Image (tube, rainbow, N blue to C red):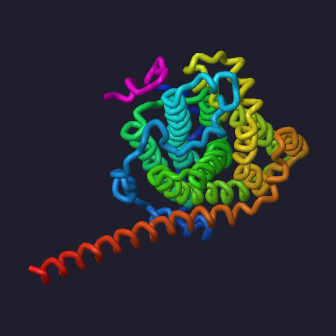
Amino acid sequence: MSTHDLYVNGPQDPLWEIPASGAARFSWDYDDGRERLLALYQKGKDKQWDGAKRIDWDIEVDPYDPLGTPDESLTLYGTRHWGKMTEKDKGELRRHYASWQFSQFLHGEQGAMVCAARIVESVPDLDAKFYSATQTMDEARHAEIYSRFLHDKVGMLYPVNDNLQGLLGDTLRDSRWDMPYLGMQVLIEGLALAAFGMIRDTTDKPLPKQILAYVMQDEARHVAFGRMALRDYYKQLGDAELREREEFVIEGCYLMRDRLRGVEVLENFGISKAEAEQFSEENEFLHLFRKLLFSRIVPCVKDIGLWGKRLQQAYVDMGVLELGDSNLDLLMAEDEEIAEQLDRDRFAQEETARVAEVEEMIAEGAGG
């Protein structure tokens, strides 16, 4: 079965073409480069992994409850439509929401792969080119994994959300070499990391927990890369150039916030767009979810030196300004540790099972 057959509402054209702009840059300076970036490049090489082997794809997934989603977190919960829904309807709603979320993750990862490749092409520094090459491979692996989960375990895909597509287009059309960093590494990756983390920490389903934990381990490096490169570069820019980038961040943050309502899902259940938008605005869980999604973006934006009055006021309007004081390094370290602990737990269980199997065979041999 092709991917097109699994789309709830298939894209009209299987290809989306964005005219390329900007220069491809070669560096003939093969000196060692920045120590911090080269250390991150080494880590990027050391931490490569195979999604087909590290993830236990034999784990069964209920397509009608892939994430263990509680009723209270569903936008229709408590509305006049909820009481009319059968248990089968509710299972179908959970399936659609999981498909919608992971489809946006999938499309975002493909966007990240293209942006990372664009950075390899356009960034002037060779040490940044080296690291971006490892990130391009990471993003390809993530897209592969999310695609497999949707195809094999959920059996349904949603097309790319309009707002996500708009931000991707704006990021890739810009000829300035730092914009793929800002649009992808800071905004899209930052928001995705927060979404991944909330699902990773709340789901009781082992397969999506594995997927999200291992992807987040990679993404922690990617955000660190963007912070290093942009912090260094933005120290050199004048006020006018910084304000241009702050305007891009403001517009991108509003786009990303509005992307997260899942209106498309409710429309597929016969609910009008206006009513679906109203339900999403009134849902307390979704309000909290949308606020927490900026927990990775706001401190990163502040850290790289974009913190003008207009940007701060936009974050006040969104109710997320206080997140600028979050400890981003601590969050990233926790992402690394959760993935490593998951590996240790899994290997310990496998070792225990092997020992038990050997002991059973010895006991059978002694009895024989």
Residue 106 vs residue 123: left or right?
left
Residue drawn at x 59%, y 66% as measured from the top left: 33
Query: What predominant SS class does the magenta segment belong to?
Result: loop
Q: Quadrant of the N terminus?
A: top left
Residue at image position (65%, 29%) is 76
Rendered image quadrant of residue 277:
top right
Residue 185 shows in the view: no
Decide which of 13, 3 is in the foreground and name it.
Answer: 3
Residue 352 x, y percent position in the rendering: 35, 74
Location of residue 263 with respect to 224 vertically, above or below: above
Task: Please name whichever residue, 196 or 252, is drawn nearer the observer in this view of the structure.
Answer: 196
Quadrant where the C terminus is found in the figure:
bottom left
Q: Position of residue 129 (x, y in %)?
A: 53, 55
Extreme residue toward the bottom, this view = 366
Q: Residue at x 38, y 59 (%)?
A: 54
187 or 161, which is in the foreground?
161
In reply to whether residue 99 is colored magenta, the answer given is: no
- Place of residue 240 in the rendered image (x, y in percent of width and height, measured from the top left): 84, 42
The answer to whether residue 210 is left or right of residue 60 is right
Residue at the extreme left: 368
Give above or below for 220 relative to 251. below
Where does residue 72 sit, x and y in percent of width and height? 66, 39
Q: Is residue 12 magenta?
A: yes
Residues in magenta, as a range: 1-14
